[in-house]
Image (cartoon, helix red, strand yellow):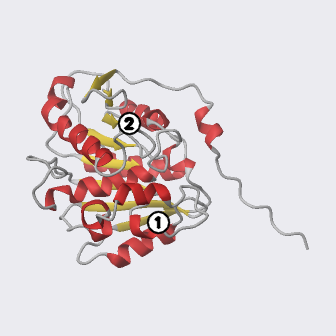
Amino acid sequence: MAEEAETAIMEWPDLLEREQPKPDDTIKYGDDPLQLIDVWKPAGKGTHPAVIMIHGGCWQTDIAERDIMNWIADDLRKHGVGVWNIEYRGVDRDGGGYPGTFEDVGLAADMFVAQAEAYGLRTDKIIGIGHSAGGHLTLWLANRPAMPAGQLRGDAPVTLDLAISQGGLPDLREGMKREGHPCGTEAPAKMSAGEFALTSPPEMAQGDVRQVLFHNTLDKIAPPQFAQRYIGLLDGASPELIETPDEGHVELVAPDSESWARQRELILKEYGLK
């Protein structure tokens, strides 16, 4: 009896070769060419809720930059939600890794609170959302206010109300052991620099931010088991894990996927738009 064919999942060209929507504005938060933020503003008068968005790419600029999130950013914009899409220096760029990548993300996220109003975006409730390595950085951002005083924490760190990890890779210590993983072991090592209590969410002091982890059952980069292990390491925090069957890593940031539909529904409900 012939075996059933394996369920087809999206590959990156299936998304990246589509016509790419563009942001409403791009602003700088530093002198490096990668220290940029794309601003997506919904149409219409008045102010709009917005998410802070962080892309993935194995923490490496050569693998991905913020524009891989453009399709879901545009989808949120169409549904009345603004987007603050952060670029940052990867471990393969001067100043990237620990501490530079974290400094970039923290500075750009804090700028949202300071400048969102000028773009017609609200800051009374803030959702952070990140894909893959960006999921790690989003969970890090959620825990940042609970960090000890210092440069990575900053003087007034943004406080998230909800952190959404899209196929995230939160455990840097475990990532350093994953021989054969597409992200390799060097990138998580450069991100942690041995400072796990400051860089790796399962080992950081936990805040009280709600965490929702979206994973797809056919994801070969970040299968649901990664989230299950992360949850098991936490003391006190209890993230929610939502699994979508028959989809992979790319579908998490594809606007017409089932997994994205579930993420969008959560965001719209949190902002009272559904």
Q: Position of residue 269 (x, y in %)?
A: 30, 49
Q: CA distance from mark 1 to mark 2?
A: 34 Å
Q: Is residue 18 above or below residue 55?
A: above
Residue 261: image location, x then y, percent: 47, 48
Residue drawn at 15 percent across, 49 percent down: 151
Identity of the residue drawn at 48% across and 61% down: 215
- Residue annotated with mark 1: 176
Residue 81 numbered mark, or none: none
Using the image as rendered, state which of residue 59 and residue 256 is in the foreground.
59
Circle 2 packing at 10 Å, graded few (<14), some (14-19), many (20+), is: many
Q: Which residue is under mark 2?
A: 76
Query: Of tags 1 and 2, which is closer to the observer?
Result: 1
Q: For the N terminus, which image quadrant?
A: bottom right
Helix, strand or loop for disc 2: helix
The structure residue drawn at horizontal position 15% and vertical position 37%, both measured from the top left corner, is 113
Q: Nearer the viewer, residue 30 or 137?
A: 30
- Looking at numbered disc 2 in the image, what kind of residue is underneath it? Leu
Residue type at tag 1: Met
Relative placement, left or right, of 185 versus 194 is right
> SS class of the residue under badge 1?
loop
Q: Is residue 157 visible?
A: yes
Q: Which of disc 2 and disc 1 is earlier in sequence?
A: 2
In this picture, is 48 found above or below 210? above
